[in-house]
Amino acid sequence: MKRNSSRRTSDREIRRLTGLSILLASAVILQLISNYVQLGTFSITLALIPIVLAGILYGPLGGTFLGLAMGALTIAAPATLGGIFFLTDPLATVITCSVKMTMAGLLPSLIFLAFKKKHPNVGIVLASLSAPIVNTGLFVAFSYLFFYPTLLELAGQASTSVTSLVFLGFCGGNFLLEFSLNAALSPALIYLCKALFRRKDIGSDVVGSPKKEISPSESK
């Protein structure tokens, strides 16, 4: 029995790693697309959906892992490396990208866990909608914390206020696009999660984990 239990645990861990690897690959592809495709003057973080899905399927550790990985990819993006923030303070830029993406994976997963027992669909929707809020909210907070002198200088050059520059120039349009996209995809995300929860090979131990196998001796 111990050998069978250990074997099932090992198989489940392999499935978890496989599932996270697939989500990571999907997030990388979507992030690369968003790095080079813009809607007018705005760009969006398409990788938020796989990050949220990782948090729902694999819990806080899964969401945190995928968020941290995508934070590293965001730092390496041409738009980041050539941006005014990185040129002003590279370390602060690294902290900003890493923390905001990591928390965009962790907090939605915690929100889902709070609703998963009684209202899992509500938890999935709230988790999906919270990701762009966390991502943009932390970007704004770190912008004021680390880059206020730079923002003040840019606002003076543009004859506007720092608040207008941050919300209308840097992240307002991006946030609306990301939030609208996540809201539009929430029904599909519910359907996808339900389908994955029913699969025994998904490797999730949050919801829909494989049913306990009953041995012949236990069934008698």
Image (cartoon, rainbow, N blue to C red):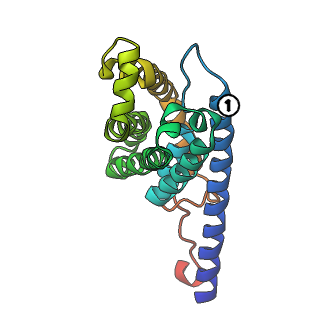
Q: Image height check: is 160 above or below 122?
A: above
Residue positioned 57% across, 42% down in the render: 74
Q: Is residue 1 visible?
A: no
Number of numbered discs on residues? 1
Q: Which of the two residues, 63 or 169, is positioned nearer the viewer here?
A: 169
Q: Image height check: is 9 above or below 52?
A: below
What x and y, as percent, mark residue 171?
A: 43, 25
Q: Which of the two residues, 112 or 89, is positioned nearer the viewer here?
A: 89
Residue positioned 56% across, 75% down in the render: 214
**To which quarter of the image does residue 60 belong?**
bottom left
What x and y, as percent, mark residue 146?
A: 36, 41
What x and y, as percent, mark residue 126?
A: 37, 37
Q: Image height check: is 27 above or below 159?
A: below
Q: Is residue 115 visible?
A: yes
The reply, left or right, for residue 78 in relation to residue 151 is: right
User: What's the residue type where badge 1 is placed?
Assistant: Ile
Quadrant into which the N terminus falls? bottom right
* Category of crowding for the residue at label 1, using alpha-carbon neighbours closer than 10 angstroms: few (below 14), some (14–19), many (at least 20): some
Residue positioned 54% across, 47% down in the render: 71
The reply, left or right, for residue 27 in relation to residue 119 is: right
Q: Which of the two residues, 14 or 86, is positioned nearer the viewer here?
A: 86
Residue positioned 64% across, 31% down in the render: 35
- Element class at badge 1: helix
**To which quarter of the image does residue 219 belong?**
bottom right
Q: Which residue is mark 1?
A: 33
Quadrant into which the C terminus falls? bottom right
